[in-house]
Amino acid sequence: MFNKKINLALLAVAVCCVFSSGCQSSDGKYPASGTVRVNGEPVKEGAISFVPVDSQASYGGAGASIIDGKYSISKKDGLFPGEYKVQLFATADSGRVRNNPISGETSPIRMHIIPERYNLQTTLTVTIEPKKNRFDYDLDIDESEFKDFLF
């Protein structure tokens, strides 16, 4: 009788653990994915970073590449629940070239197509919740805000 109660209790604990885990990974991280567009066009190549709003947070952030307007952070590389600043970075070919005075070679000039208000001085924030998180960004940016990317 005593063993039967213990087995039932263990079964109840196991069932609760299975049903309460949802899409949480074993270490408490959650995935995030979405799209990034500038002026209606998918960002060809770029990066997205999620940085904890609380600089004293006991957890770090995560990031991913943006390819053809899409990004994805897996559960393994995911984010802990909480508030994050979102930083978006992307460059594009400006159509101009630069001359290297030493080698005499020319190279294309790249330009930042996402201004600082969306990266170094970001105003974007998200809340990571215990589920699959999807965040899409469609940024309207005046081309006068594009800046040359200097090495």
Image (cartoon, rainbow, N blue to C red):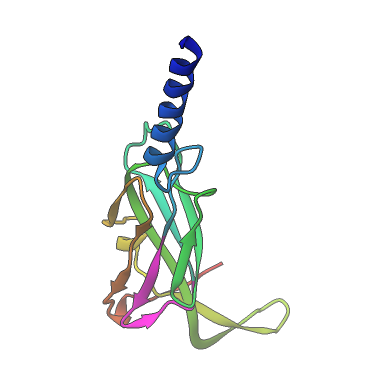
Can residue 127 be seen in the rendering of this structure?
A: yes
In the displayed structure, would residue 47 be above or below residue 2?
below
Between 7 and 97, the one lying in front of the other is 7
Tell me residue 36's x, y (percent): 38, 71
Q: Residue furthest bottom?
A: 95
Tell me residue 73's x, y (percent): 48, 57
Between 74 and 108, the one lying in front of the other is 74
Q: Residue at x 27, y 80 (%)?
A: 142
Would you say residue 20 sits in the magenta stretch?
Answer: no
Q: Residue at x 38, y 55 (%)?
A: 132
Looking at the rendering, which quadrant does residue 140 occupy? bottom left
Please state, as top left, top right, bottom left or bottom right, where the C terminus lies in the image: bottom right
Residue 126 located left or right of residue 149: left
Tell me residue 125's x, y (percent): 28, 53
Can residue 120 be seen in the rendering of this structure?
A: no
Tell me residue 89's x, y (percent): 43, 65
In the displayed structure, would residue 150 be above or below residue 52?
below
Start-end of magenta stretch: 33-45
Give the number of marks: 0
Magenta span: predominant SS is strand
Residue 61 located left or right of residue 55: right
In the displayed structure, would residue 131 be above or below residue 101?
above
